[in-house]
Image (tube, rainbow, N blue to C red):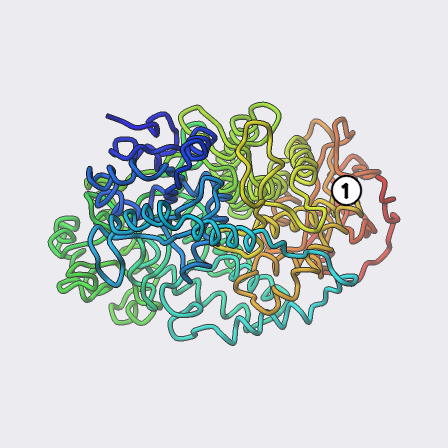
Amino acid sequence: MPNRLVHETSPYLLQHAANPVDWYAWGEEALGKARRENKPIFLSIGYSACHWCHVMAHESFEDAETARLMNEFFVNIKVDREERPDLDSIYMSAVVAMTGQGGWPMSVFLTPKGEPFYGGTYFPPNPRYGMPAFREVLTALAKVWREERSEALRVSSQMAADLRKAIPLQSAQAPQFSPADLASAAQKLVATYDAQHGGWGEAPRFPAPMTIEFLLQQGQRGEIAALATATHLLKVMQRGGLMDLVGGGFHRYSTDNDWLVPHFEKMLYDNAQLASVYLHAYLLTGETSFRETCESVLDFLLREMTHPDGGFYSSLDADSEGEEGMFYVWAPNAIDQALPDPADRAFFRQVYPNLEHGNFEGKTILQKPLDLTALAAHLNLPLASLDECLADCHRQLFAARNQRVRPHTDDKILTAWNALALRVFAEAAAALDRADYLAAARKNADFLTSQLYPRDMLLRSWRAGQAHLPAYLEDYAALILALLALYPVDPNPRWFAWAERLTNEMRSEFTDPAGGFFDTRVTRAGEPELIVRPKDLQDNATPSGNALAVQCLLRLAQFTGETAMQSQAETVLGALQPSALKYPSAFSCWLQALDFAVGPVQQVAVIWPAGSAAPSEFLGPLAHAYRPRTIIATASYPLTVAFPALLAERTPLNGLPTVYICRGFICQLPLTRPEDLTAQLDEAPLTNPISSRLNAAT
């Protein structure tokens, strides 16, 4: 008989709807029951694509005797961490504080007030690897609650107090930003980089797209070592293992230092961020393989992770047929069947020479040599021909692989993750002249601003026609940045209007008077209070909401001239700057904001007569180069709707499309000839200013 989770929309919660455990979703029904019955809460947090979450569910939550213990002694709550990052953040901090490590599934035991007194991650059904059996944990904690409750309450009260300790986000003095700070952070990242294998630290190794983006920004400033580090890691990751060479897209992380054996789940947020850095690296270096990788990722998202209405799904599972990675690895006979032509098989074994014995549990994860040039020379083939032959073999393997049982798709649509994808689809549409990417970006923006904003507020999650849960700071900030990226690519003033509207709401609902932003909005009537209002500052697999919010304010201030917005962003950034410079890999999104704050920022206003098409002769070259400190405002003239202050008093000269390039709202001579655009964009000093700085009130 199904439990209460059968009424939820989260695929992760629905996976547990048939458990004999009397599961509740997080909410007043469960919390009220715990208070009334004075029972402790067992809180289990995971996500749909999590391998060990599935393992614990099968071993323990599907077991009748384990479920009996859980139901008798605890109120059991199941949470999808992707829908509720606030709960995940609070209780992960508690688990790490108690045990020194975290992970999923997360298993936390709470008082009826929601304060944690014991926690861990995966517990096995029988004692092993130094871990107690889950039934033993349940029995012991039930006894503690019955016989030593005062101690449990003391521990939980102290833990809650520690979690509530505020992190000050007010600068002691006026913030100072300089290029030397950027260079210092980049040098630390270069110095700690593993130049042999690629990456930072020991395995498991994560792809670090935010760090790569910061290094690319410094490469654009002329820091050769930063650019070399970023491009080396990009080449290492795209050779396979972490990247799915057959179907496109990246897996979650590498379990080894050689980037060969991944954790096989595919997450939307990873693929969106990685597509972005490969796109920017292509624009910066001209390296064709970076463009191919970007397009491979985006084509994968369109093909396998897109809802018909335009939203992007959250993830693909690591497991299929009960085994992690089964969908992606190759036995020798499977490759022979997929490549019926003996010449193709012989060629494929030249590229992947260890297929007979495998490189992973007797099977093969495809990983190309880092440089195929030597192999092309050995085979007496032009490199382009080798690439074409290899692509044809991969297409044949893709067709064969599609006959296998596919991993489960978590088809919920999350605002922040979709916004990361929207941003790169918009940028890639213009940079790579891909009309299909632009269509996907428009459709996604329409979906997010309608289905995820059904009434008076932005929501977090959508599935099967239902949107729910108030949006978090990261949802607002990521969507604002995405809409600002779409606005010059699809010159529609409503995208900028939406960005302004969401920014006003973000500042109103999330600003902490003590500095920075809370991750959650003001609690509304009927919503359970959390034991602490979280404010995550460090970047994780996705950017810190605070770092994204600072980027939003810095960028929007360049459109509007609003000094209060600029000042708020700089104050928060100044407070985090010491941490970002000391720990650059943990605060890379903050360093991207610092790069923008250091500047100089170029403001580009493009305006053209009403009735004519947007001038591709200007917008195209603007998109075909990597300029991370350039913002672009567009409109047709006369201006009939709300528009950025940057466009005020700008008119088309002689009825022609016209470009104004400005810094600090002080502009150079307007351009009407496309051939003059690049030279003026790259010109360092301003010459012949024709307009004064806009008044801050505009």
Q: Which residue does the numbered mark 1 point to in the structure image?
A: 560
Q: Nearer the viewer, residue 380 or 589?
A: 589
Q: Nearer the viewer, residue 691 or 110?
A: 110
Query: In the shown orientation, is residue 79 left or right of residue 452?
Result: left
Residue shown at the point (81%, 37%) measured from the top left: 651
The image shows residue 72 at horizontal and vertical percentages of 29, 36
* Quadrant the C terminus occupies: top right
Residue 297 vertical placement versus 196 (above, below): above
Q: Nearer the viewer, residue 109 or 506?
A: 109
Residue 589 vertical placement versus 295 (above, below): below
The image shows residue 115 at horizontal and vertical percentages of 48, 46
Residue 398 vertical placement versus 353 (above, below): above
**Outermost residue to the left:** 333
The image shows residue 438 at horizontal and vertical percentages of 52, 37
* Quadrant the N terminus occupies: top left
User: In the rendered image, which quarter is residue 217 located in?
Assistant: bottom right
Query: In the shown orientation, is residue 403 left or right of residue 578?
Result: left
Query: In the shown orientation, is residue 642 left or right of residue 186?
Result: right
Q: Amino acid at mark 1?
A: Thr
Mark 1, secondary structure of its residue: helix
Residue shown at the point (82%, 38%) measured from the top left: 648
* Residue 311 visible in the picture: no
The image shows residue 414 at horizontal and vertical percentages of 47, 37
Q: Nearer the viewer, residue 264 or 142?
A: 142
For the image shown, how many numbered marks are present on the structure? Answer: 1
* Residue 80 visible in the picture: yes
- Crowding near the residue tagged with mark 1, few <14, some 14–19, many ≥20 C-alpha atoms within 10 Å: many
User: In the rendered image, which quarter is residue 599 located in?
Assistant: bottom right
